Amino acid sequence: MNKFKIIGAMLIAVMTLAACGGTGNKKKISIAYANWADGIAITHLAKVILEKQGYQVKLLNADIAPIFASVSHKKADLFMDAWLPLTHAVYMKKYGNNLENLGDIYNNACLGLVVPQYVTINSIEELNGVKDRFSSKIVGIDAGAGIMDAADNIIKAYDLQFNLLTSSGPAMTASLKKSIEKKEWIVVTGWNPHWMFSRFDLKMLKDPKNICGKSESIYTIAWKGFSKKNPFAAKLLSNIKLNDKEINSLMEDIADTKTNEDDAVKIWINRNLDAVNQWIPASGKTFK
């Protein structure tokens, strides 16, 4: 009987260790993101850094409206691509009481209508005069995206005789690439930061009526109370700051990757060790 008791005790001990170890013991964080180049880049950057600290990170892809709703209702922990104070103001007004802002990541963001450099107009006011060259179409991205609301406002403010086409971020850049290869005229909803500005020779059309506003900042938002429950993660995320060169090179690495986003991020981190390690709180694990 003693032999069986010993074996039983050993089995219980093994099961207890198994329950406490492995992924079951990992801290979990979920990050919602939309299919926008900057958001994809920032999200995967955070994922790789958090995983280094022992977190199990789950990524949730969705459109912008469900993202804000999900974070406000704790269905997702974070969204790292909130454009404020203008682009996503409507969502902050609706859900802001249940959200907390962990700080800005990048502070030179802007959006508007973009054309290839060879297009001979420079202002939104000139679009109607050459509408046939563009087939009276503006190629947009996801319905509900802040830039699509801005494009609708532009069309109304300038009385543009154009149709705004709904597609996606990747579909928009694919259309842009195809048109440039053929030297065709195309106008798209565009924003900076985006890898397309380093890949193609582009210009943002002037907006004399300032419908799109001035430069904005990109923020990380979480559900209200997240930083109190997860102080280490909140501190790390609030420390992430990217300048023009850093965010553009990160997006290019991801756009050019032959494997996956996380591998591209790790290559980028190896080139930017000093900056990345400064974001990690003293008790965390740095990259070598």
Image (tube, rainbow, N blue to C red):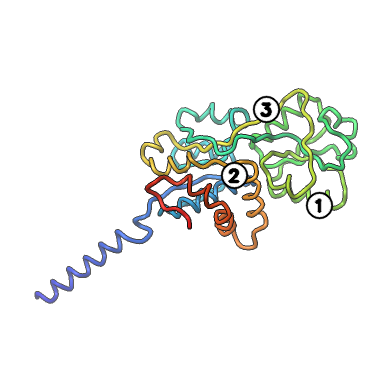
Residue in view at x 50 percent, y 30 percent: 95
Find the distance from the CA under tag 3 to the CA under tag 1: 30 Å
- Residue 2's place in the image compared with 279, above or below, is below
Nearer the observer: mark 1 or 2; the answer is: 2
Q: What amino acid is found at the position of numbered circle 2 in the picture?
A: Gly
* Residue beneath disc 1: 178
Give SS at disc 2: helix
Secondary element type, mark 3? loop
Q: Amino acid at mark 3?
A: Lys
Residue under label 3: 214
Residue 201 image offset from top left, x and y in percent:
80, 45
Q: Which residue is mark 2?
A: 39
Q: Residues within 10 Å of mark 3 (few under 14, many from 20)?
A: few
Q: Residue 270 location in percent, x, y?
A: 55, 56
Between the residue at mark 2 and the residue at mark 3, the CA separation in whole angstroms equals 20 Å
SS at circle 1: helix
Tag 3 near tag 1, CB within 8 Å: no
Of mark 2 and mark 3, the one earlier in the sequence is 2
Rendered image quadrant of residue 88: top right
Amino acid identity at mark 1: Lys
* Sequence-wise first label, 1 or 2: 2
- Residues 60 and 124: in front is 124
